[in-house]
């Protein structure tokens, strides 16, 4: 488990991260979200030991993260940091050695991952000769090459076509099945909804929303409903239940004044209800709503 305790970091009096605390369970894919300048990258860099917090503590599996070898961490940064003149296999092997693999393991793992990403026949090409999408694949390989327990990915889908996005998601889910802990930061909310069970939304250095995605959705679900029915209904009576209302021949849509179950109990006695659904907001809608409050 990864635990962040009251992390703070300031730059020239500006609070980049202000008292941030959250837990990421072993085997979880945890969405870490926020607008540009929210403090995400600063937090990630503190986890990775690239910078140190002004105060607070980070623990991984019960140990202060600064006491552990960084070889157990995998990091895919948003900004590419590849050696453009190096060849693909050389790059992978070099980073494998840096992260504690012996030469045999580094060669074997490099070959396996390059083939998995369809780059096995390009291993002698220079990084600068690759497309942006293929360079992103190399970045992803470097974060996984040494089989780390904690994997942090910042905008991993950048530059990838839909097929390679599917491959990336497949591998992320494989790593979750292996019990790896994954922190996933992106602006692509639909990817978070597909992959993550728990999220943290940060803005201006502070946590705005944190917890299980399903619970957060329920909390932000308004009393907006849509009902399809058959039969005749009194418009004036229906209007007593709604602040906003749209009524067509067989559909009621609007925002309720009362609890949905109260309205449903009443309308069931009047007409035959064919469908009844609450309008659950998307994560993008929640994101915009919460960021707009500050």
Image (cartoon, rainbow, N blue to C red):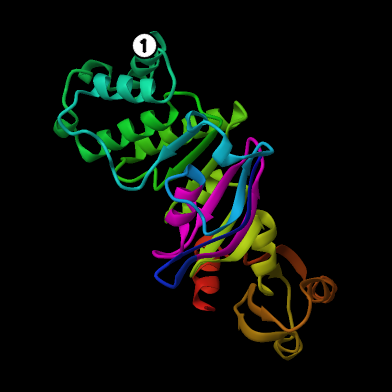
Query: Residue 283: x and y, percent?
Result: 54, 60
Q: Residue at x 38, y 22 (%)?
A: 96
Local crowd size for mark 1, using a 10 Å CA cut-off: few (<14), some (14–19), many (≥20): few
Read off the residue under disc 1: 103
Near-viewer residue (77 or 97): 97
Near-viewer residue (228 or 133): 133
Q: Quadrant of the N terminus?
A: top right
* Magenta-drawn stretch contains 35: yes
Query: Residue 44: x and y, percent?
Result: 47, 49
Asked whether the viewer can see residue 191, the reply is no
Query: Residue 118: x and y, percent?
Result: 30, 22
Q: Quadrant of residue 220?
A: bottom right
Relative to residue 216, is residue 123 drawn left or right? left
Q: Residue at x 19, y 36 (%)?
A: 131
Q: Residue at x 75, y 89 (%)?
A: 240
Asked whether the viewer can see residue 178, the reply is yes
Near-viewer residue (46 or 66): 66
Residue ranking furthest to the top: 104
Residues in magenta? 17-46
Relative to residue 47, is residue 220 drawn left or right? right
Q: Residue at x 74, y 81 (%)?
A: 233
């Amino acid at each position: 488990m990864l635990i962040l305790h009251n992390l703070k970091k300031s730059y020239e009096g500006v609070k980049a991260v202000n008292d941030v605390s959250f837990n990421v369970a072993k085997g979880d894919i945890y969405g870490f979200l926020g607008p540009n300048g929210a403090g995400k990258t600063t937090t990630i860099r503190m986890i990775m030991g690239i910078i140190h917090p002004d105060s607070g503590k980070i623990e991984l599996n019960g140990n202060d993260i600064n006491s552990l070898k960084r070889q157990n961490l995998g990091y895919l940064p948003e900004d590419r940091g590849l050696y453009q003149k190096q060849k693909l296999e050389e790059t992978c092997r070099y980073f494998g050695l840096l992260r504690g693999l012996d030469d045999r393991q580094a060669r074997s793992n490099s070959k396996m991952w390059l083939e998995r990403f369809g780059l096995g026949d390009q291993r002698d090409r220079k990084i600068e000769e690759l497309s942006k999408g293929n360079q992103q694949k190399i970045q992803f390989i470097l974060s996984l090459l040494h089989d780390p327990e904690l994997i942090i990915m910042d905008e991993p889908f950048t530059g990838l076509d839909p097929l390679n996005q599917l491959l990336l998601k497949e591998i992320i889910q494989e790593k979750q099945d292996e019990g790896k802990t994954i922190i996933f930061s992106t602006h692509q909310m639909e990817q978070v909804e597909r992959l993550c069970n728990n999220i943290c939304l940060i803005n201006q250095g502070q946590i705005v929303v944190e917890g299980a995605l399903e619970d957060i959705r329920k909390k932000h679900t308004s009393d907006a409903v849509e009902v399809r029915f058959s039969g005749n209904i009194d418009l004036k009576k229906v209007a007593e239940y709604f602040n906003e209302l749209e009524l067509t021949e067989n559909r009621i849509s609007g925002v309720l004044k009362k609890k949905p179950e109260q309205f449903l109990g009443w309308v069931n006695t009047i007409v035959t209800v064919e469908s009844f659904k609450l309008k659950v907001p998307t994560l993008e809608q929640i994101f915009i709503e919460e960021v707009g409050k500050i």
